[in-house]
Amino acid sequence: MKTPMVIAGPCSPESKEQIDYLAKILSRIPGVSAMRAGLWKPRSLPGNFEGVGEKGLPWLSSVQEIHQIPVATEVILPHHVEQCLKHNIKILWLGARTTVNPFYVNEISKALKGTDVTLMVKNPINPDRKLWLGAIERVMNNGITQPVAVHRGFSVHNSPHYRNEPLWPLVEDLKAHFPEVPVLLDPSHITGNSYQIDPLLYFSPLENYSGMMIEVHEDPKNALSDAAQQIKPNRLSYLLNKYFTNSDAIQSIKTTKTTDHLLSK
Ligand code: PEP
Ligand code: MN
């Protein structure tokens, strides 16, 4: 079955109860294929919530077992990879701040060689085509045969519209270079606020994407990180229904290469 890959969940899980509650709801929303939950949060300013870290790993593995949904988290250091492997976390991602660093990209992808973990590579913070394509090439050279790219937008000084500007032509360029690499859209980190997500999806060239990664929280305004951009689960259902099951745009997504195999491990 050809289905879009939709990864939804909190920017960062705050407690076991919260992640259980969200997993129960998200795993029942048609179209949600995996849950996201960033345990280690690289924050620009010190003093902000940096995620619960290692303590949350058993929460994520229990979500995978109980709710039968693969969970994705961000890895920044090679020892995060080791810890995630011990807890059987199914999907890992390189964040924008890590994709910029070829040494970290190498260390992390080497640590994953030979495993069945899916590695996602977010675009780097700055709009540098070579950094993103280079990181993808590097992970493939290190034996990660089926990485997934994530377009989370690029930091542009005084961006008039969004937290991070989407660069649609750069995604086309990436697809031309790596036709086998699925690309997910991350509307949360592009817009930086929940009210622009719907219009962004409306204007996005969804036919170039194999799905999306989106931040969902049960009480966004009280979230410990990225409060402005997280949406509630019922809003996710609405958006999935509007863009990922009914629209013409998603019909073209459905006919692109399936990503089911990446999630069925
Ligand atoms: C995130 O996904 O929560 C995150 C920190 O993303 P990025 O690396 O895109 O800033
Ligand atoms: Mn976030």
Image (cartoon, grey):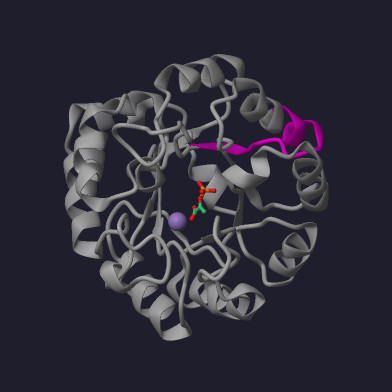
* Quadrant of res 61: bottom right
* Left or right position of 107 against 133: right
Q: Nearer the viewer, residue 47 or 16?
A: 47
Over which residues does the magenta segment extend? 137-150
The relative height of residue 3 versus residue 208 in the rendered view (above or below) is: below
Which residue appears at 74% of the width and 36% of the height? 139
Q: Nearer the viewer, residue 64 or 128?
A: 128
Which residue appears at 24% of the width and 64% of the height? 232
* Quadrant of res 169: top left
Q: Nearer the viewer, residue 202 or 100?
A: 100
* Left or right position of 194 against 148: left
Residue 241 lies within the magenta run: no
* Quadrant of res 140: top right
Expressed as whole percent of the image width and height from the top left, the position of residue 243 reads: 22, 39
Expressed as whole percent of the image width and height from the top left, the position of residue 217 reads: 33, 67
The relative height of residue 105 versus residue 79 in the rendered view (above or below) is: above
The relative height of residue 52 versus residue 131 in the rendered view (above or below) is: below
Which residue appears at 30% of the width and 31% of the height? 160
Q: Quadrant of the N terminus?
A: top left
Expressed as whole percent of the image width and height from the top left, the position of residue 113 reads: 80, 47
Expressed as whole percent of the image width and height from the top left, the position of residue 80 reads: 72, 63
Which residue appears at 77% of the width and 49% of the height? 108
Residue 141 lies within the magenta run: yes
